[in-house]
Image (cartoon, rainbow, N blue to C red):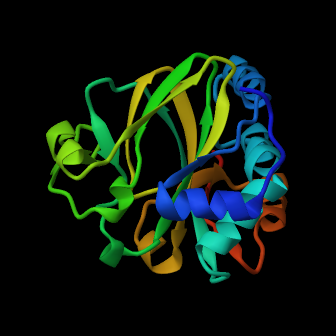
Amino acid sequence: MASISFSLDTAKKALLNEGFVDLRDLKVGQHIWEFEQKGFPFFTKDGLDFLQQRVLGNPDIRSIVEWFFEDKRCILAHCLRWGASPGHIESFLAGGEDAGRRALMVQLLAKGSRVDYYACSHLKALPTEKGPRSTHELSPDALREEGCEVRDGNFSAGGLVIVDARLGREIKAGYSITVTFMTEDLATGLPKMALPNLVALREKVAEMESQKIGVNFTFRSVS
């Protein structure tokens, strides 16, 4: 896919109606490959730089996040690498309109990743089971009965997709570095991401926070 110019209105409509939006950023795969070569150092200065440069410092992502939470403060709650899990259709939160917009996931997809997204499933209160990754696992039959059509994503060069956390999706190949934003009440009680208690990291975290977006870090003693 060729790169397209960003439109916040288009992104809003896609997230509201289908539950996800593909920003078609063909540079992401290379950035992820470079991060992988460093050994995925999430909880180091390199990891914080990656978050700042590729997520918080991306104006397209930031505008979507702030709109999604209706300009109320949200928390960057965690950053995880999600590997392929073919045969498992997962959602981070249970779906349905009554569930509301409480969490948003930014997927930075590695080269060669393949992901199926089940359009509109975020608006359906579907039965779920606890999946192997402590997610909500959805039945393909239930999705089919509700008319949730699959949108297959083939990210040969990598990609950037923003997903309502209620949406059903299946990572069939590759992996995503997934950054999840949540409402403050949902993030309360979640395990914090632990960083070494170093001045440089404390300063970096302070730079990352803003009036509208907080971060879920804590600092541990360095022996």
Assign the N terminus to one quadrant of the image: top right
Residue 196 in picture, x, y percent from top left: 67, 49
Instruction: Decide which of 212, 35 is in the foreground and name it.
Output: 212
Q: Can residue 28 be seen in this view?
A: yes
Quadrant (top left, top right, bottom left, bottom right) of the C terminus: top right
Whether residue 217 sits left or right of residue 142 in the image: it is right
Is 41 drawn above or below residue 92 in the view shown?
A: above
Q: Name the foreground residue: 179 vs 159.
A: 159
Task: Find residue 42 and report its image quarter.
Answer: top right
User: What residue is at 60 percent from the left and 70 percent from the top?
Assistant: 68
Q: Can residue 163 be seen in this view?
A: no
Q: Nearer the viewer, residue 129 or 43?
A: 129
* Side of 112 where 89 appears, left or right: left
Q: Is residue 65 left or right of residue 143?
A: right
Residue 19 point in image, percent of width and height = 48, 56
| Image position, residue 161 (x, y; %) | 61, 43
- Residue drawn at (75%, 65%), measured in percent from left and top? 63
Q: In this view, does 174 lie above or below 178?
A: above
Q: Residue at x 72, y 40 (%)?
A: 47
Q: Is residue 58 above or below residue 77?
A: above
Quadrant location of residue 73? bottom right
User: Who's the residue at 78% across and 28% down the image?
Assistant: 2
* Closer-to-camera residue (32/148): 148
What number of labels is visible?
A: 0
What is the x, y in percent for residue 204?
82, 57
Residue 88 relative to residue 204: left or right: left
